[in-house]
Image (cartoon, rainbow, N blue to C red):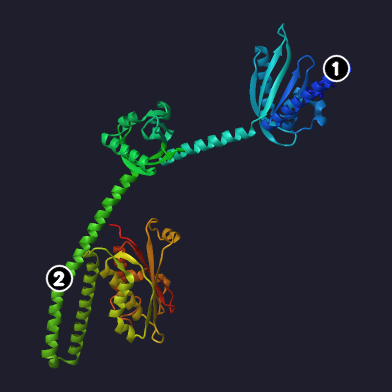
Amino acid sequence: MANDNSNKDPFSIPLPDESEHAKDKSTSSVDDSLQVHDLLDDAEEMLQFGTWQWDALTNMVTWSDGLYRIMGYEREHIGHLVSDEFYLSHLDPFDADELRQIRSNAIATRSPYEYTCRVRTHDGRELVITIKMKFLFDNNGRIIRGVGMCRDVTEKTQMLRDLMHYKKMVVQKEEFLNLGTWELDLETNKMTWSDGMFRLMGYAPQENDHEIDLSEFYRLHLSDEEVRRTNEAIHEVMEKGETYILQSAITRKDGTVKAIETFAKVQKNMQDKPFKILGITRDVTKLKEYEQELEIKLEALNRSNHELEEFAYVASHDLQEPLRKLTTFGERLRNRCGDQLSEEGVVYLNRMMASAESMRELIDNLLEVSRVTRIQHPFVKADLREIVREVLEELDLSIEDAHASVSLHQLPAVEVIPMQIKQLFNNLVTNALKFRKPEVSLQVSIRSEKLTKPEKDKLKLRTGKTYHKITVTDNGIGFEELYAEKIFQLFQRLHGKAEYPGSGIGLAICRKIADNHQGLIMAASEPGMGATFTIVLPEKHSP
């Protein structure tokens, strides 16, 4: 229990009244003491701690101003209430009992103690407090007093928790992504690994010291060729001061070989000299296996497509001869025996000749489709505007007969197969002329612009490449939006042959040409509102 003097300031100094000289001397001493008190109070406030004393003889407890601040009290309001039990009432009962036990053991062993616990303050805050205390004894071993300090470590504890949480997230991320991080000190040639690097090598993190000799690391896990390639990459990045990405293979502790990919970046000091390399190494074994499987499937698919194209070409070519004979003998029959045929026989002959002509057109179209992918021409940089101008010149009579006008805007120069691109625009302009409105003057517009990054992301195109979007817009009859993909399929027609002649193969050829150029072609339309065909082409062709 605290006595009546428990609110007495432990830092106050009594002022003796003896003589003027003594008074002056005392006044000077008081001033010095007040300065020390203020200095200590400022230190307590800045460092967020408070002190207390416990007089074992009187059982009186005194707090410093810093401890009042921590506990959320004003000295003048509760100074007379301060006691050991009063302080312990702010702790959880379990923590309070444990602190009593620790304190008793410390007194019995005459040793200081330290304890960290949570404290609920008068103003409703929950703090984490570290308590430190030691005891003073007389010559007979009896306890005289205890002095202690309480420090608010709430912020520090939270920082430690955040750090531990961050470290846990890093470990989980390394485990999930199967990667590790490392640092290479260029002065000492020493490496520091994360736990993820040990796992990559097949070790448990505690099996090895985190300071690994670089040459030993190479010798144990890399082949001589991989050592050479890695050293070359490191020397190159030191000279250029940039980054490097290196794919290699490691032999793990259990003897298995894994494919890894390393990304590293050099750091420079104030003198612009490399002093450290930071790196991330990840296991790409499964990714490599997947890529190999994909390449095998792609190769088989390309081989199958090539065989189908060859078959279509040979079959179409071989069909030409019997079809030619059918047409020839049909013409002879009409010329030599036409007057001997009945009216019904003439109808049958005409229908046979018409079917033969349709068959010939179909075979020619099949040959044209197979020719697009079967015969590969070199890619050259060409001005698309000039190619389209040639197309318009060749179609000038058809454009004039249809009373149509074509607005040709600026188009880019890209790497293409000019003959195929010419065929693509020829098909699109011809398509617009065919599906125009009879009562409306046809208007065709051809323009281009570069694709933006969001557009490339939406179309799932390579972000690092430049793509151009060319749009061919008309005010023709249009079509339902649900057919926007169907019209690019082979022999697909939305209208009857009597109304709109053709084989339904022109847009399919456009799609094949766009695919050959690593590009895209799309259509958008509404009935009666015309159609817009969008061609996306890369500026440079990638082999």
Badge 2 amino acid? Asp
Q: Which quarter of the rendered picture does the C terminus lie within?
A: bottom left
What element does badge 2 sit on?
A: helix
Q: Report the residue marked by disc 1.
A: 22
Q: Where residue 318 is drawn, which disc sits there?
A: 2
Q: How many discs mark residues in the rendered view?
A: 2
Circles 2 and 1, Cβ within 8 Å, touching? The answer is: no
Using the rendered view, name the quadrant where residue 342 is placed: bottom left
Using the rendered view, name the quadrant where residue 490 is placed: bottom left
Q: Is residue 302 left or right of residue 446?
A: left
Nearest the eye: 143 or 16: 16
What element does badge 1 sit on?
A: helix
Identify the residue at image location x=41%, y=26%. Answer: 209
Q: Is residue 51 left or right of residue 218?
A: right
Q: Decide: is 81 above or below 306.
A: above
Task: Classify 10 Å Cα crowding around label 2: few (below 14), some (14-19), many (20 and above).
Answer: few
Q: Decide: is 193 above or below 263.
A: above
Nearest the eye: 6 or 11: 11
Q: How far apart are the alpha carbons under marks 2 and 1?
A: 132 Å
Q: Earlier in the sequence, mark 2 or mark 1?
A: 1
Q: Position of residue 414 (x, y in %)?
A: 32, 65
Badge 1 amino acid? Ala
Identify the residue at image location x=38%, y=58%. Answer: 461
- Can residue 67 be seen by looking at this rendering? no
Q: Residue furthest front?
A: 21
Q: Nearer the viewer, mark 2 or mark 1?
A: 1
Q: Position of residue 82 (x, y in %)?
A: 78, 25
Q: Decide: is 510 above or below 453.
A: below
Q: Is residue 305 left or right of residue 117?
A: left
Q: Where residue 434 is drawn, which disc sits there?
A: none
